[in-house]
Amino acid sequence: MMKDEQELRVQIAALSESQKVDLIVQLMAQVAHLTARVAELEARLGMNSANSSKPPSSDGYAKPNPKSLREPSGLRPGGQKGHEGSTLRQVSDPDTVEVHSPRHCPCGYCLDGVAAARVERRQVIELPRRLVEVTEHQIVTRVCPQCGRMVRADAPPEASAPVRYGPRLLALSVYLRDYQLLPYERLTQLFRDVLGVGICKRTVETAGMQAYDALEPFEQAVRAQLLDEPVLHADETGMRAAKRLLWIHSLSSPTLTLYQAHARRGVEAIEANGIIPAFKGVLVHDCWKPYFQYGGGHALCGAHFLRELLGVHENEGHRWAREMAALLEMIAGTLGGRGASPLSAEAADWFGKMYDDILARARPELPPPEKTPGKRGRAKNAKSTNLHGRLQTHRDAVLRCLRDPEVPFTNNRAERDIRMVKLRQKISGCARTFEGARHFARARSYLSTSVKHGKDIFENIVRAIVGNPWIPKPRTSQQ
């Protein structure tokens, strides 16, 4: 027996019975607290992007296997029978035609002047040696024979200086910067290596500011049109600018995207944007609390709940979480296979009853709140208890997709749009100033909306550079 243990036994023997009971109670409470703390830390170690809201970048090299909501189709990979393939096709009006004719027959006879029996067409798609054209505008001045006045011709708008870049070249710099997300150094290097143009960073910034100013009527039109949408998708993410954290907020619909840069994430930013407070339709989001202060109806992203349920099942061992995840996966599969037709009322009622039954059976499994010894305030709930509470409180928002055919199961539309912000940071880094973040937000709004309408992105940027931006038609005029 160790000396320390002998001393402890002596100390315990010297205690009275009541002191021993108090000591046992104290030690049992401490053991319970430490056990819960160990379980919490183990659960935190088991969290990743597949079973929580953690971003994929936090997974490191141990990437979890992605879990798809799709059911296996049983078909072989690749193109299926009857699928219309695509291949490189010839054009009807090539820029250059080169004729290759045989001069002599192998027997020695000269074939010059002999009519062609057959012509085989082959085309090569290639870049021209010079991708940039230089046009010189000579502004002529003449002297009027009658009055002697010097009359000079007007220069075209694109030739307002002795030497300047044209709108298409400037539009290319905006396209590479704000759509392809190239950093300035790589962008200017591409211009030098491929185009032979020594464009500088300041020129790219000036083109971006020129497009930003021209796109103000576009942004105002999109703001007005978003209010007429029946369903909007909202999301937000952090972005570093001017050595601090700011937030990019997005609002999305099938045909519109609007980004907003703001110093705050919460109510202040939502009020500054002005759209959500005036919106009367259904707002789809990720159950972030400030959104519930506004609007008519709310719908919550089922994919987020699926990840959290998987984490609770894996890290805390709750069976109800797996049952709820299976039900939500069934809902996703049913909605994905319904096409454009709404779900029947009987099916929606059945899913709602199963949802309520699982939550009711889950209550005995939920752990009691854990009070941290020595700390003031309310006892802390486990993740499973908090998740159960949100599923219970926001039941109608979780299941709104069952009864409203325009509401999807997930908030993927907003997720796809907001992902471009993180992609920008990975490729080009943070914004240098808050104004730079605002310019990026407006440009991405224009580009994303153009893509959703199937427009030529580059030509739309050219229109913005020359001060005539494309503006989408209102929803009523599209119907």
Image (cartoon, grey):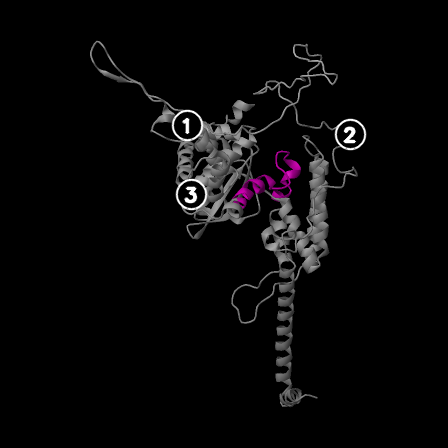
Q: Amino acid at mark 1?
A: Val
Which residue has dot 2 on it? 81
The answer to whether mark 1 and mark 3 are in CB contact below 8 A is no
SS at badge 3? helix
Q: Residue at x 60, y 60 (%)?
A: 381
Of the 4 image quadrants, the one containing the N terminus is bottom right
Q: Residue at x 58, y 41 (%)?
A: 416
Distance between the alpha carbons at the discs numbered 1 and 3: 21 Å
> Does residue 205 show up?
yes
Q: Amino acid at mark 3?
A: Gly
Of the 4 image quadrants, the one containing the C terminus is top right
Asked whether residue 34 is drawn in magenta, I would say no
Asked whether residue 417 is drawn in magenta, I would say yes
Q: Position of residue 66 (x, y in %)?
A: 68, 48
Residues 162 and 417: in front is: 162
> Does residue 294 show up?
no
To which quarter of the image does residue 316 belong? bottom right
Q: Position of residue 363 (x, y in %)?
A: 68, 56
Q: Residues within 10 Å of mark 3 (few under 14, many from 20)?
A: some
The label number, if any, that marks residue 228 in the structure image? none
Circle nearer the N terminus (2, 1): 2
Circle nearer the N terminus (2, 3): 2
The label number, if any, that marks residue 466 in the structure image? 1
Q: Is residue 138 above or below residue 61?
A: above
Q: Is residue 430 above or below residue 199?
A: below
Q: Position of residue 321 (x, y in %)?
A: 69, 53
Would you say the magenta stretch is mainly helix, strand or loop? helix
Q: Amino acid at mark 2?
A: Lys
Residues 238 and 186: in front is: 186
Specify start and end residues of the magenta stretch as a single range: 396-423
Q: Residues within 10 Å of mark 2 (few under 14, many from 20)?
A: few
